[in-house]
Amino acid sequence: NAGVTQTPKFQVLKTGQSMTLQCAQDMNHEYMSWYRQDPGMGLRLIHYSVGAGITDQGEVPNGYNVSRSTTEDFPLRLLSAAPSQTSVYFCASRTGAEAFFGQGTRLTVV
Amino acid sequence: AQRVTQPEKLLSVFKGAPVELKCNYSYSGSPELFWYVQYSRQRLQLLLRHISRESIKGFTADLNKGETSFHLKKPFAQEEDSAMYYCALSGPSGSARQLTFGSGTQLTVLP
């Protein structure tokens, strides 16, 4: 059972470039979310989805887009990368109480 | 708005000493509280949740609604407990289920 799979693990972008972080889960969870992890700030919610076709903004949504066309996939798009988006990104899926996390994507924007 | 506060960014204790990681929350209603742990080079994973009232790896946490706290405790710390610990909160089942995290506490257990 793969759980939550994120790709890529590492990425370097130039300012202004766009890219998509991929997230897939094989546990048939309805609830999925994206967080960014920054030193001293913990995990902050970017976007989340309560099911296919339904997405909503979290605490820090600016500069990011998401879509949820299937239950399994929840990609995160950076529209025009900025140095402030340098962070570690985590995707999570959830059923009931427990959230399951991907291994993270370390993104650097130069 | 729901909020989780972890006042200690760093905490160091010696092996065998008791450890307490503090967590306070703000939520209008009856939240669910969790502790998540991230060991070096591993994924974030659930350590325990208040509704199950269990002890995991010797850790316990009691929800104190009067003080709006959910402190994590262990009577005798071990070196393998060194990790980043996050306190988290969500609304009760059936409500908005956003999981809100605190800023985390890096625990180091010294030999």
Image (cartoon, coloured by chain):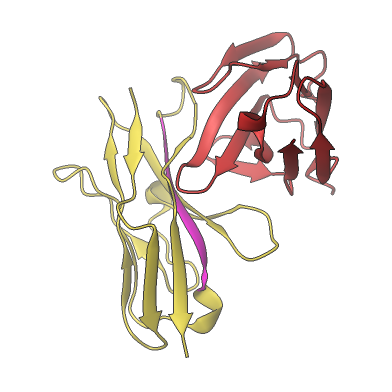
Is residue A79 shown left or right of residue A41? right
Quadrant location, the N terminus of chain B: top left
Colour in which chain B is drawn: yellow
Q: In the rendered structure, which segment of residues is drawn in magenta?
A: B82-90
What residue is rendered at 75% in x and 14% in y?
A67
Task: Name the one closer to the observer, B99 or A40.
Answer: A40
What residue is rendered at 46% in x and 51% in y?
B86
Task: Name the one closer to the observer, A24 or A15.
Answer: A15
What residue is rendered at 79% in x and 24% in y?
A75
Residue A67's place in the image compared with B13, above or below, is above
Colour in which chain A is drawn: red
Residue A47: x and y, percent? Answer: 61, 21
Q: Residue B45 is drawn in which quadrant?
A: bottom right
For the question of whether residue A6 can be seen, the reply is no
Residue B32: x and y, percent? Answer: 39, 38
What residue is rendered at 42% in x and 61% in y?
B54
